[in-house]
Image (cartoon, coloured by chain):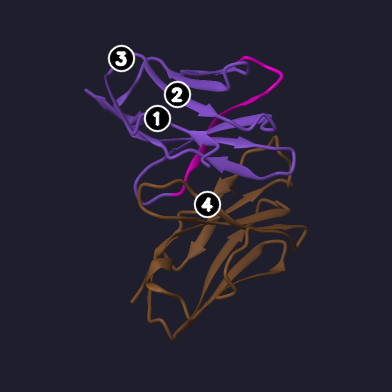
Chain colours: A brown, B purple
Amino acid sequence: DTEVTQTPKHLVMGMTNKKSLKCEQHMGHRAMYWYKQKAKKPPELMFVYSYEKLSINESVPSRFSPECPNSSLLNLHLHALQPEDSALYLCASKDRVLWNTEAFFGQGTRLTVV
Amino acid sequence: DQQVKQNSPSLSVQEGRISILNCDYTNSMFDYFLWYKKYPAEGPTFLISISSIKDKNEDGRFTVFLNKSAKHLSLHIVPSQPGDSAVYFCAASTNAGKSTFGDGTTLTVKP
């Protein structure tokens, strides 16, 4: 199993809503990532979890709250988002947080904030 | 300050010919470089990588060349196939484990 599964694939939410994005992998990877990608732009790193602990937070606003309940799951809790937060949110995993390994990406969640 | 740049937003080649995608970087701390391919409505998938101690890595139809002095790398695809049509992202990593992506190049291979 070399898949990273993200749910939901599409999400529309109002600015006062609370929602969560989910990511799951069963490759035994111990590093998991959230990226944000706007149209015609590269993926931008948001958070990195290593061995279920948050190791990198790229100064992301607090309306985005990550959670890693176990080594297979990664959540991104959303609250009071703004329309400019609309983007494709990608989850990725790596064997470990090492520089010389490739990341496996999920298909992404297309988020629209209205 | 964009540390990884792909200056060609798009590239069109004929099936069977060579595709050359270019990438430039500015941060000399980068020491591992990767290429990812992305189809619409899918996440990026890993294609090929190269360590800074090498200048070439080959995998089937795909070859990546690294010129450290010029801070430049390129991806060669030969022969190009219509199924290669996708967006190609160059990424560079430091030993802290963070990857920085370029803006991507959309490759179109015409039959």
**Nearest-to-viewer mark from 3 and 4:** 4
Q: Residue at x 43, y 67 (%)?
A: A85
- Does the magenta stretch mainly form a helix, a strand or a loop? strand
The three-letter code of the residue at mark 1 reads Asn
The residue indicated by pointer 1 is: B7
Mark before the other along the chain sequence, 1 or 3: 1
Q: Is residue B106 magenta?
A: no
The three-letter code of the residue at mark 4 reads Glu
The image quadrant that residue A84 belongs to is bottom left
The residue indicated by pointer 3 is: B16
Q: Residues within 10 Å of mark 3 (few under 14, many from 20)?
A: some
The three-letter code of the residue at mark 2 reads Asn
Q: Is residue B53 magenta?
A: yes
Q: Which range of residues does the magenta coloring cover?
A: B43-57
To the question of a shared chain for discs 3 and 2, the answer is yes
Residue at disc 4, secondary structure: strand
To the question of a shared chain for discs 1 and 3, the answer is yes
Q: Residue at x 49, y 21 (%)?
A: B74
Residue B22 circle label: 2
The residue indicated by pointer 4 is: A44
Cα–Cα span, label 2 and label 1: 7 Å
**Nearest-to-viewer mark from 2 and 1:** 1
Mark before the other along the chain sequence, 3 or 2: 3
